[in-house]
Image (spheres, grey):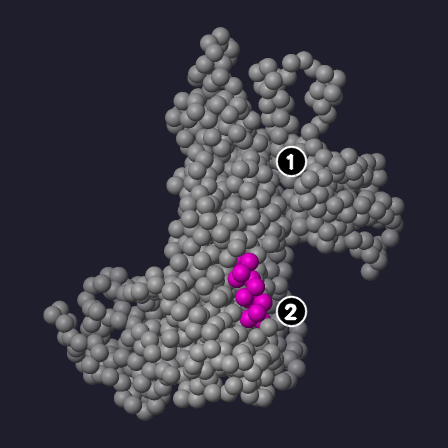
Amino acid sequence: MIQYNTGKSAKRRASSTRSPTPSLFEILSSSNYSPMSDNAVSEEASMDGHPPNLASIPASDSTIWADASPLLQAACTGLRDGELIHGDNFNLFAAMSALEIMDPKMDSGIVRTYYSIDEAIENGAAPIPISPDSTVDVQSTIDIMDHLLACEAAWHKGHSLAQTVFSCIYLLRLDRTAPHALLHSYCRVTRATCKAVVSLVSDARTHEEEDLFTMMYGLPLNGDGDDKCLSMLNAVEETISRQLRACKAASSKRRLPEDLEPLQSNPNLEEGFCKALLCRLRFRKHFFHILACMKRPQGRGLESARKHIASCTTELESILKSADFLRSCFGESCEGDIDDKTTASGREPIGFDAMLNSRLSAPMPPRAIKILSWKKAVEYFVKLLHDLDVICSHSLDEHLESLLRFVVQFQKSQPDLVARSHLQLLLVQDGKLYGRDPFFAVITKAAALPEATKNHDIQKNESILQLGMLVMNLLKILCTNAAWQRRKLGKLLQDWRVIYVQLELAFRNAFGEVSSSSNDENICMKIFQHILLWVEEQTYWIAFRFLILGFELELYSTSEYCMVYWYLYAVLIKLAEKTHLKMTVSYDTAKRKGKKKKDSPKDLARESRIPPAVLFLQCYMCLAEGLTMMLAALRNEISVFQSPGPFNTEQEKFAQHFELLQRACIPDHVSYPSYKESTTHARFSTLAMYNYFKDAQRIVKEVKSSFSNDPDRLSELRKLEQVAEHNSVAQNLICRLGALDPSLKVSFEFSHHPFFPTVVVKRS
Amino acid sequence: MEAMPEEKAEFEEAEIKYVSYGGEHHLPLIMNLVDQELSEPYSIFTYRYFVYLWPQLSFLAFHKGKCVGTVVCKMGEHRNTFRGYIAMLVVIKPYRGRGIATELVTRSIRMMMESGCEEVTLEAEVTNKGALALYGRLGFIRAKRLFHYYLNGVDAFRLKLLFPPPPRQELSPSLDT
């Protein structure tokens, strides 16, 4: 019998058995080493005094059990401090994976409460029925439902399934709950829902950092008969509905229509419990339907999904309202803050043990996780339903440009993984937009080419095909969490730059410098020209998103703002230029196609006017330039917002922050020396000569009317206006007093806008 | 929440002695410090990996014979860059805020630079204002944000310090253009 020494002596740390070649340590485990290290745990581990089941790891054909204690003892005596046994695959690096058995911080197999699920059940941890008293049974069932909801929310938020939803013993052994129809059907639907959600997120395949989500650990997620879970739920719902009608009839002294068995024994509480249960059951039903509807291809189920979302939200409201009744039921005062509890009633639920599955989570170290409070769980689902509703209400017929804006806007509310995965799967299915529009058609429309272009043979061109893939990937990436998104966008820059070069090469190879007279060649040329322009515009848009996400993620320190706004300005100039060019070219194309018969004065005026979309970008440019110059002047005049370190200079930080942009030459001819040149002469006196913030204010006023039908952009303009106004005043103040008043403190706060700060000037 | 107010140790900065990792006798000191202050569980093998392979990159700070702080690092080739990595940095509470951590890290970084590293990197919790300020002052930028990096769900920043390119060696005056 092998027994590990449970002492903490530094010399006697057991090592993990990673080495494939037989070694001393290999003898200590069988080849079927399972995390259920029943044999290896000494008798002190079992808390209730029963010896562990010794027969759980049998010897097999290729392994035997041998007592290695004398060998270990000899090795310990023979080794001196600091010596390590080396093996072919066991060295210092490999040794880092070693665990100390019985260290609660490291040993996932350590027994805390029960040895196994079966032992827990044998000891009454999850009784069926929950209580012989039917009132307590119903009350406890509701507590279980509430705690499960809290677990589900905790899982969605990033904890493992094993330690959340599947900490429920009833769920782990679902079949034994069959005699308890209410609990059984609820658990079954929950399990089926979890399975559907895991499948959804796995399909999206962009949850790299959130990979804990889809780890199933061999948990019993696939149940026979789970596809019938809704009909089971409906049956239970029907029974309770009838019961509710009956007790309402009884209270109004009307004759009982049927001879129904009450839910529980206290007639005064019957109505309250029925209502509390019904809204919980109905929530599950509608939520399950939402998932099924939204999964339907090409967005066919979105309208139905919206109906279920509305019902689901109503049921959540009822669930919240039921809390008062549930808490007051027995006149118990609950200990501690009710808001922290994971149930509406405030009572601890029966039948949960998060540590039972900790072995399944190995080799991750065991960690107690905090399940969301019930209140926060409900809030989470309210938000989730809202986010899903936004997705379902989105029209599927938009221009790519407005779709991109929609996704960016959607992300502002910081939707969680489940909502984001739904959006992504709606947008990209079967290699098409919405599973319906080939990406070449999407691109030609975005590039302002005529409708018929989408059928052109040029779509078979290798570079054009690759471009389609890039657009598809861009859409997927825009649906991911901001941190991961920014890293991927940075990598994309190179791909988009390369595709541009490839397309340009293909263009020149096909047409040289001479315009051809052939009609088809003319069309090809037009397609290339439009697409090239559009690719450039998109590339700068990606660069713009990459830079501003840095603010949301708090990647920039104040001493780096000057170079960031300077670079942002450089990118915005190009973005505005390309956007304007694209619009001009598309206008010309439309003209040449004969759509414009002759230039009316109105047309001429429109042509010379700057399009609103470009003006919008110019507003950004003014703010970026204003901030750059202000920061540069502050640095040059009073030496603030710079951070000289002992090991490197601003030049290294510039190289690091803009490495991906520089590598892709976005934009060209932008470098640290040119940044220095632009900012080195900034002074308060130069700042006083030109107020970029006033320019921004002027542009906002001019362009507001063009976006009167676009509430998102109007809201953005309002924020820009506030920033411009505040900063204009601040600039004047700084110019007048900056050099004279040493007590002046300048700070930058993102109080009005997420990536353009408001300058705050105070006296310290 | 601690029942007693934190007591700050009284000392002059000059009283702190900084020592490079000198052998197995330093290992329990480092282990005790780190086990006490950091929440991640490390086995003795983790410590040995660092201090055995890169003893010159680990430093200890002593005050009157008591070990009050330590830094543990490594360096190596990573995707075509020779890069240093700061694995652990601890100073016991009564001695914080007096520049000991900065001094420990600075010594290690200097050693990395002298050994030919092109950059230094580490991860820190986004909520660890103290660490972010410390490394920010030394020239680290926040290169990336890592979503839910830690098991408790907290995000991390990947901090990176890029050394300037070493000055080009002049071969002989006559070869200067």
CA–CA distance between discs 2 and 1? 44 Å
Of all chains, the one bearing label 1 is: A
Q: Chain of mark 2?
A: B
Q: Position of residue A699 (x, y in %)?
A: 76, 36
Q: Is residue A316 magenta?
A: yes
Q: Nearer the viewer, residue A18 or A61?
A: A61
- How far from the left and from the top, in percent, is residue A510? 44, 16
Could you say which quadrant of the image residue A571 lies in? top right
Looking at numbered disc 1 in the image, what kind of residue is underneath it? Answer: Leu
Magenta span contains residue A260 = no
Mark 2 vs 1: CB contact within 8 A: no
The foreground one among A393 and A252 is A252
Q: Against A3, is B117 above or below?
A: above
Image position of A359 with respect to A747: above or below: below
Residue lying farthest top?
Answer: A517
Look at the numbered disc 1 and give the secondary structure of its residue.
helix
Specify the principal SS of the magenta part. helix
Say above or below: A304 vs A191: above
- Residue in view at x 64 percent, y 44 percent: A564
Q: Nearer the viewer, residue B110 or A99?
A: A99
Which quadrant of the figure contains the C terminus of chain B? top right
Assign the N terminus of chain B to one quadrant of the image: bottom right
Q: Position of residue A413 (x, y in %)?
A: 60, 54
In percent of the image, x 59 and y 58: which residue is there?
B135
Where does the magenta region start and end? A309-320
Residue corresponding to mark 2? B98
State how many labels appear: 2
Residue at 40% x, 22% y: name it.
A457
Label 1 belongs to which residue? A572
